[in-house]
Image: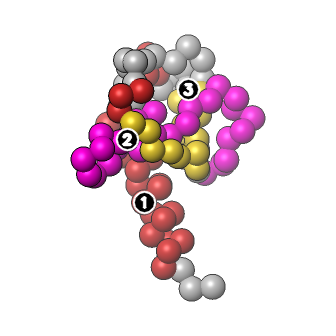
Amino acid sequence: MLLAKMPGPFSDWLVCAITSQLKHEVPNWDEKIDLGDDDFKSSGLKVPSLARIGKLATVEEEIFQGGLGKISPRRLKRIMKKLSKYLDESVFSEK
């Protein structure tokens, strides 16, 4: 799942893994995309799936061969908020 275009001249994208293996869900972290969700049909997914927020990578734009579908802007915003909040709290937490 494309999350954001990275800065710089390299056309890299931050991506998040998607899996249909619901047993791998990290509760209160991963984002489940279910059959009854408003954006399930537009997502292009065939079965309920998870956006694995902890499984991130940067990839070059040139490897993309086309889009599968789209999630709602609301869902993308929720994912990005979880990720940014976690990173902010992790970096600045005193242990």
Instruction: Tell me: 50 left or right of 6.
Output: right
User: Whole-percent x and y of residue 48?
Assistant: 60, 23
Q: Can residue 74 be seen in this view?
A: no
To which residue does mark 2 refer?
13
For image coordinates 43% across by 22% down, the residue present is 43
- Secondary structure type for disc 3: loop
- Secondary structure type for disc 1: helix
User: Whole-percent x and y of residue 56?
Assistant: 53, 46
**Magenta-tinted stretch:** 1-28
Dot 2 or dot 1: first in sequence order is 2
Q: Nearer the viewer, residue 21 or 10?
A: 10
User: Whole-percent x and y of residue 16?
Assistant: 50, 40
Q: How far apart are marks 2 and 1 (CA)?
A: 16 Å
Placement of 59 over or under 33, stated as above or below: below
For image coordinates 40% across by 24% down, the residue present is 64
Q: How far apart are marks 3 and 2 (CA)?
A: 25 Å
- Secondary structure type for disc 2: strand
Q: Which of marks 1 and 3 is in front?
A: 1
Q: Which residue type does callout 2 highlight?
A: Trp
To which residue does mark 3 refer?
34
**How many other residues sit within 10 Å of disc 2, few (<14), some (14-19) or many (≥20)?**
some
Placement of 23 over or under 37, stated as above or below: below
To which residue does mark 1 refer?
84
Q: Which residue type does callout 1 highlight?
A: Ser
Placement of 90 over or under 38, stated as above or below: below
